[in-house]
Image (tube, rainbow, N blue to C red):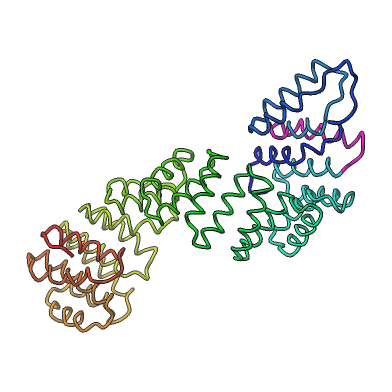
């Protein structure tokens, strides 16, 4: 239950324990109408605890002498966000009648909402002392053990709860999550099937089952589950993000874009949604939009350094060479194992006539590269064009196809700057033969070939 937002979690508790009230079935004076429990239940099912609370309070004001379900009142107060009033109600009930498992588990849930997991555990352990076979208490305590990564204890308590009540929703869900964590995806999905059957209106059961189905390569099933979760909880942004990721894998671009747009609409600061949408726009060659999204990613989360490289490539393809140089330089700072980024930064400056800046930068980077490695050879060639023949010979003799393609790209780019188009294009054709689709050098080479009317 820790995965639920506080108000939703309180509402879930009401739904779970609504039938456990201690006074709902108490005999009442024949002259008084019964409390409106049916209407209250309908409001709870509709996700409207405020109306449910208003109904109960209206009845209490109209019939001051009537007996009402005071535990339900406390739970409705919790669901409606009146935490301190609910705490007072529960404390009064405990003082008057003594602690019961139902009172303690409700108070424990209130402590969960308040962020006091230590107090929550103490209350659940007290409840278990009063009733060692209370399935809801067992499941709630197991969930706390699972949060603390005490998985053996969690599994034992979940199992005990299911022995008592094989349909206990929290125990089914918790056990399914344990199998998901253990990467036993088939068993996890099987248990989530049971959890969905026991609690069909819990959106989390569907979204978490989607994770298991995706791990089993059932992406269509994962999409179906996430769609159900979205129907049940249409304002939870993460389900849109997850479904968009599956749509991207399935090449369903329009649906992916719609989900990412919706996630961003719900939470404009969700940097991952911008990152995925930037990648989608890049794939669809909507480069200006992709650039905007990558810049938004870095604005929201500077430490998401992997946005620098794709942003740099997009700027280069759009011939924003100054911005490309800065972005490639940043990419190299954060990924120094990628010497191409340093060379591409220098090349970007060369494209706008900043030869001095490129030379200064490359001289500062030579010490980063392994001696006589291919980046050293290319950097020296850029610093001294007289080394052209030696660099071309080294590239032609390179056995590693990827390294050879990269060297030829940088050679061809320098030749293009000198106006030697025919030789440069011949080398660029060889660059596009490498299988790495997202290789920066290959993408730029393909665009250059297209500019000169040649297919890669």
Q: Where residue 287 appears, x then y in whole percent?
A: 27, 49
Considering every residue shown, the one lying at the far right of the view is 97
Q: Position of residue 338 (x, y in %)?
A: 34, 69
| Image location (x, y in percent) of residue 390 | 16, 81
- Relative to 151, is 56 above or below? above
Q: Nearer the viewer, residue 40 or 240?
A: 40
Secondary structure mostly seen in magenta is helix
Question: Residue 124: x percent and y percent?
Answer: 81, 49
The structure residue drawn at horizontal position 79% and vertical position 17%, both measured from the top left corner, is 61
Q: Is residue 222 left or right of residue 434?
A: right
- Work out whether 159 lies above or below 203: below
In this rendered view, identify the residue nearer to me: 319 or 336: 319
**Residue at 48% over, 45% down:** 240
Q: Residue at x 13, y 57 (%)?
A: 451
Q: Depth check: give the residue in front, 447 or 342.
A: 447
Magenta stretch holds residue 405? no
Left or right, residue 313 beside residue 50: left
The quarter in which the C terminus is drawn is: bottom left
Span colored in magenta? 77-100
């Amino acid at each position: 239950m820790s995965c639920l937002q506080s108000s939703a979690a309180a509402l879930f508790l009401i739904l779970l324990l609504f039938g456990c009230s201690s006074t709902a079935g108490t005999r009442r004076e024949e002259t008084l109408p019964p409390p409106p429990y049916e209407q209250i239940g309908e409001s709870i099912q509709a996700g409207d605890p405020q109306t449910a609370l208003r109904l109960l309070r209206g009845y209490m004001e109209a019939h001051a002498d009537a007996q009402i379900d005071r535990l339900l009142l406390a739970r409705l107060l919790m669901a409606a966000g009146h935490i301190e009033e609910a705490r007072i109600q529960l404390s009064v009930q405990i003082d008057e009648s003594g602690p019961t498992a139902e009172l303690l588990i409700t108070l424990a849930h209130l402590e969960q909402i308040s962020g006091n997991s230590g107090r929550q555990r103490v209350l659940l352990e007290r409840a278990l002392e009063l009733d060692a076979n209370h399935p809801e208490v067992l499941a709630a305590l197991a969930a706390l053990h699972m949060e603390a990564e005490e998985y053996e204890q969690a599994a034992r308590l979940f199992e005990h709860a299911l022995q008592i009540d094989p349909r206990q929703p929290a125990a089914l869900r918790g056990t399914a999550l344990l199998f998901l964590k253990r990467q036993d995806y088939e068993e996890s999905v099987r248990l989530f099937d049971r959890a969905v059957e026991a609690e069909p209106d819990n959106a989390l059961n569907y979204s978490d089952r989607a994770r298991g189905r995706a791990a089993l390569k059932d992406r269509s099933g994962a999409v179906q589950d996430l769609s159900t979760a979205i129907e049940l909880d249409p304002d939870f942004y993460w389900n849109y993000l997850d479904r968009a990721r599956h749509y991207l894998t399935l090449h369903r671009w329009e649906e992916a874009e719609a989900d990412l747009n919706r996630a961003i609409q719900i939470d404009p600061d969700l940097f991952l949604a911008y990152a995925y949408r930037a990648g989608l726009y890049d794939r669809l060659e909507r480069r200006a939009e992709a650039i905007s999204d990558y810049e938004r990613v870095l604005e929201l989360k500077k430490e998401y350094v992997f946005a620098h490289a794709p942003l740099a490539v997009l700027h280069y393809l759009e011939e924003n060479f100054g911005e490309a140089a800065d972005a490639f330089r940043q990419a190299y700072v954060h990924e120094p194992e990628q010497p191409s980024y340093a060379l591409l930064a220098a090349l970007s400056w060369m494209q706008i006539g900043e030869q001095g800046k490129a030379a200064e930068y490359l001289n500062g980077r030579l010490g980063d590269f392994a001696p006589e490695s291919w980046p050293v050879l290319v950097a020296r060639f850029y610093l001294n064009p007289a080394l052209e023949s030696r660099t071309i010979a080294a590239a032609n003799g390179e056995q590693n196809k990827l390294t050879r393609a990269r060297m030829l790209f940088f050679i061809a780019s320098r030749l293009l700057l000198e106006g030697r188009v025919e030789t440069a294009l011949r080398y660029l054709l060889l660059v596009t033969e490498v299988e790495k689709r997202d290789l920066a050098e290959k993408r730029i080479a393909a665009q250059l070939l297209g500019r000169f009317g040649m297919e890669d």
